[in-house]
Amino acid sequence: MPTKSQAQAADVAALLRARNALIYIVTREEARVERHLFEACAAAGYANVRFWDCGEGVTKLDGSQAGIGNQDPGETLNAVRSLASNGSERGVWIMRDLHKWFDGIVGVGIVRQLRNLARFLPSVPRERAQAIIVITPVAEIPPELAGHATVIDWPNPDRDEIAAILDAAIASLPEDLKANAAPNGQRDAAIDSAIGLSGEEAASCYAKSLVQTRRIDPVAVAKEKKRVIAREKVLEWFDPIAGGLDAVGGLDSLKSWLVARRAAYSPKARAYGLPSPKGCLLVGVPGCGKSLTAKAIATAWGVPLLRMDLGALKSKFVGESEQNLRRAFRVIESVGRCVVWLDEIEKALAGATQGAADGGVSSDALGAILSWMQDRQGEAFVIATANDVSSLPAELLRKGRWDELWFIGLPNAQERVAVLEAALRAHGRDPKDTELGAWGMVARDACQGFSGAEIAALVPEALFASFADGERKLHAKDLQAAAANVVPMSKTSAEKIARLQEWQKRNGARPATAPESEQVSEGRKLDL
């Protein structure tokens, strides 16, 4: 099966045979793309390939001067017309820096020359056929050329290409280092860690890992993706939280589902043909673990966590908001396997359903998100959180957009214990410490109606009290006293929570917690 680049090269060859005179290729990787373009030109019957840049002018494949044209793009374009009119050979001109000459007074002339050539070249005899391929890192082309140029967004290396880069990096080592350099049992991890990087970036990361550790370290290679995200400035990289899903108290049904979905990324699942999970929507009571779960998934799966702030992507300039959103989608697809977190999605898309006077930006964003979620081919797992489902559009909630729609309510007795235990461990306290006392009873009896965030907040509050009291150890009575000062959201926002629970029953959202009758202690009371 051909790689993505080979398939793209075959497409370019077909365009050349169809006498497309102006092809616009968007890429940051000149060297890798030019190798494929040379093969495409040969397949289309164009044996004479010339390269132009502003530094060396017109050169041949071996780097020597071609003896025609010069560093001036206008003169070189005149040479193209001359060969098409009076020459005796077919040729392709690969121009590297031409996009820099599209601005200002000079740009007017260059754009006009390109436009004239795009109209003239398809009609010249076959034996004198000439074509121009512009390589550029930016996707914007002059509107005058939009109807003449065929624009191709060249893909990053796929798995097979990354695997070849990995093998080449190892093959270049001395024989005595090859055995230890190969990632024993981690070949797939080493390849996955570089998915989303350019070919040059992947080769550089593998080389850096070999120099530093004398082996390919998938973790070190994956860190390079953080630089890619920072460069694009449309997504936010979150470092993984310690503990993974163990840091989330309760939500056993949701966590079991997530653990099962992780298996879909294994080599066996890929060979079996198992589709990659799309994502899930978490709806429920604020402060009950939706955002924490999103952060924990990335840690548990060992993939990057990218937060897409839809509000931050909006711009005051017409069209720029949509452009930012599309760029974010391209970055996600290029990163490969990752978790994409859309926090409080109902607030970002409120204008799409409530008639906000934002010029249709929210509606456009909703449409772009729905289309991307339906058609995307990458391995990104999208997890969105929402507190107010009444403002979510129905088309976002339907089956097929998500693998599952989950409802997260107030924690039950067992979950309250699990949340408090996780909070104690997060603050360096051992829940098994006998001096801590009956902290579990506090969670079950004193925290009824508390959200997970309200329970977790008891630990730092209690630590302040124990520190002020002679820096002694934390006791259960400190947690009990902290809980007594809390008015839970289940009382202050009872109507809102009731509406969420009614929505869950009406829409059949899957509960994140296994059904369990609430166990409340009737006989034993705490003597604290």
Image (spheres, rainbow, N blue to C red):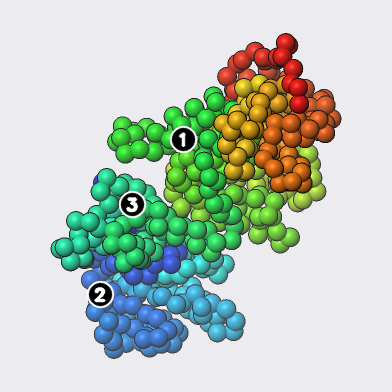
CB atoms of marks 1 and 3 within 8 Å: no
User: What residue is drawn where x is 31% and y is 67%?
Assistant: 211
Determine crowd level at label 1: few under 14, some 14-19, many 20+ residues with C-alpha closer than 10 A.
Answer: many
Horizontal placement of 389 versus 434: left or right?
A: right
Q: Nearer the viewer, mark 3 or mark 2?
A: 3
The residue that mark 2 highlights is 48
Q: Which residue is mark 1?
A: 277
Residue in view at x 29 percent, y 58 percent:
215
User: Which residue corresponds to the image point at 44% horizontal and 77% vertical from the top-left?
Assistant: 97
Image position, residue 226 (x, y; %): 50, 58
Residue 160 visible: yes
Res. 130 image quadrant: bottom left
Q: What x and y, as percent, mark residue 36?
A: 30, 63
Q: Eyeballing the image, is 221 above or below 419?
A: below
Q: Amino acid at mark 2?
A: Asn
Separation of marks 1 and 2 at Cα, in angstroms: 47 Å
- Disc 3 marks a residue whose amino acid type is Ala
Labelled disc at residue 190 = 3
Point 80% across, 48% down: residue: 357
Asked whether, in this view, residue 42 is left or right of residue 12, the answer is: left
Number of marks in picture: 3
Q: Position of residue 414 (x, y in %)?
A: 62, 22
* Whole-number angstrom distance, CA of label 3 to CA of label 2: 39 Å
Between 377 and 234, the residue placed more toward the observer is 234
Can residue 390 be seen in this snapshot? Answer: no
